[in-house]
Structures are given as C-alpha cells and as structure tokens.
C-alpha cells in the first residue's frame, strides 16, 4: 500500500479463504521458462526490438512491456491486437502439457475438507488459464471445494491486480476485512496487499523448490500476517484441533 496509508483493519473471524492454485494447492511443474521465451519471441515477431524484454520477468510484466514497446515503435493497432490474441493461445497450449503430471500438493485435501466442514467459503485466484485451472482441480479431486474461481482467462483485470481479488470476493459475498488470501509467491502477497486483504504465505513444496523460492523473511517483508511451512502446517493454523474435553469430576 502507498506510504502513509493506514494499515488495513481486519475483523474476526475470517469468513472466506481464497487460494492461489499452482504451487499452493497443486504441483504441476509448469515450464515457465519456455512460456516466458514464447511470449518474448512472439512480441519480437510483432515488432518489439530484440533485447527489450527479459526472460527473468513474469509473463504479465513482459506482456505489459511488449504493449509499451509496440506503441513506441509505432506498431499498428491491428498488430498489437493480433499479439494479444496469439500469446494467450501459445502459453495456454504449453500450460496444458503439464496437466498429466499435475498432482495435489500434500495436505491439500484434508485442509480444504476441514475448512469446508467449518463453513468457510473457498475460492481460487490464479494466473493459470480457466481451462487448465478447472482441469487441474478435477484431476486432483479438489474441484468440489471451489464454486468460485477467477483465472487469467476471466474478463477484466488478472492477478496481481488487486481488482482481480476484489472482484472474486464480491462474487463470493465476502467483505474485504473478513477474507484471507493464501499463496506461495510474492505476487500473491502483492495482490493481497493492494486489495487490503490479509495474506498468509505458504513456503514452496520441498520437491519443487528452486534457488529462487520464496522465504519466510521475504513473505513477512511483503506484508504476510503469517507464514506456513506447508499445507498441514497451514491446516493447524486455520483449522485447529478441538481441545480435549475436561474430565468429569468424580
């Protein structure tokens, strides 16, 4: 949030929990480097000068920069429209190649069952395509928990725009101060912070973590209210076991 803004106020208890999908609830091994390279190659084909885009940037930032570069070089509107129509089809196709190896992250089903049993409304906010997100939830058996889902394919802004999260919460009927967003990436924290929604980070799964994986310190610096080591740890925080009943007096 901008410097000088008051800290958001939160009301207890939380009524709804929104989750990121890939890396947080499912593990797919997306070929993100190939997806980023594909966007850059397409942008250059449509007129972006070579070397202006970096394969280290997230895809959405490369797309934003490509639009700016195409306007700067005087590309016709038709060329920009064709680029914006072609790149999603290209990365959607690469993304779907990961579906056969997509699996639930350990602890996902018990966590969601516990939240659902306690009446939480659950939603998904993801930068995956609608097709992949729905198919991944079906494949992993998690689809019944999520009547609410917003993907990069939805009309309007996409994550990490705060408005994407706010639109989903309105659909869910959850006030901003009664919501929680859970994710495994700093972009998730950025989105929650911009929407003034409390955020909990989940450290990347050990089997998929890389040298660039997020850390508890980075999450806290980004405004996370708490950081869970994994989904069972998150479940212990959000769905605590009931206290044992006190013994009856003799």
Image (cartoon, rainbow, N blue to C red):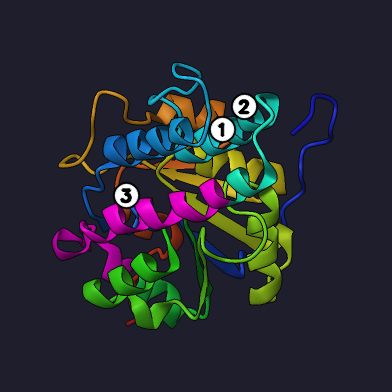
Please say if the residues under marks 2 and 1 sit with CB atoms less than 8 Å apart. Answer: yes
In the image, residue 129 sits, relative to residue 72, either above or below, namely below
**Residue 34: percent from left, percent from top:** 27, 38
Residue at 64% of width from left, 49% of height from top? 78
**Residue 106: percent from left, percent from top:** 20, 58
Secondary structure found at label 3? loop
Residue at 76% of width from left, 44% of height from top? 8
Secondary structure found at label 1? helix
Which numbered disc covers residue 69?
Answer: 2
Q: Which residue is mark 1?
A: 66
Cα distance between the residues tagged 3 and 2: 31 Å
Which numbered disc covers residue 125?
Answer: none
The answer to which of marks 3 and 2 sits earlier in the sequence is: 3
Residue at 42% of width from left, 32% of height from top? 40
Q: Which residue is mark 3?
A: 23
Which quadrant of the structure image shows residue 63?
A: top right
Q: What's the magenta region?
A: 82-111
The answer to whether residue 27 shows anywhere in this view is yes
């Amino acid at each position: 949030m901008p410097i000088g803004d008051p800290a958001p106020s939160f009301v207890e208890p939380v009524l709804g929990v929104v989750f990121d999908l890939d890396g947080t609830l499912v593990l797919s091994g997306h070929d993100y480097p190939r997806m980023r390279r594909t966007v850059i190659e397409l942008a250059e084909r449509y007129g972006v000068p070579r070397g202006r885009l970096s394969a280290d940037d997230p895809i959405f930032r490369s797309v934003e920069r490509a639009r700016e570069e195409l306007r700067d070089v005087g590309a016709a509107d038709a060329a920009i429209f064709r680029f914006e129509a072609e790149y999603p089809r290209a990365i959607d196709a690469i993304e779907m190649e990961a579906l056969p190896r997509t699996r639930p992250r350990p602890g996902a089903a018990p966590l969601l069952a516990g939240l659902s049993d306690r009446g939480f409304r659950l939603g998904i906010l993801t930068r995956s395509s609608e097709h992949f997100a729905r198919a991944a939830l079906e494949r992993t058996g998690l689809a019944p928990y999520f009547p609410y889902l917003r993907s990069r394919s939805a009309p309007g802004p996409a994550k990490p725009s705060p408005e994407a999260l706010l639109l989903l919460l309105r659909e869910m009927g959850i006030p901003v101060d009664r919501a929680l967003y859970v994710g495994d990436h700093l972009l998730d924290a950025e989105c929650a912070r911009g929407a003034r929604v409390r955020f909990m980070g989940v450290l990347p799964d050990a089997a998929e973590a890389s040298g660039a994986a997020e850390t508890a310190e980075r999450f806290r610096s980004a405004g996370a209210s708490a950081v869970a080591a994994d989904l069972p740890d998150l479940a212990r925080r959000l769905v605590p076991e009931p206290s044992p009943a006190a013994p009856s007096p003799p």
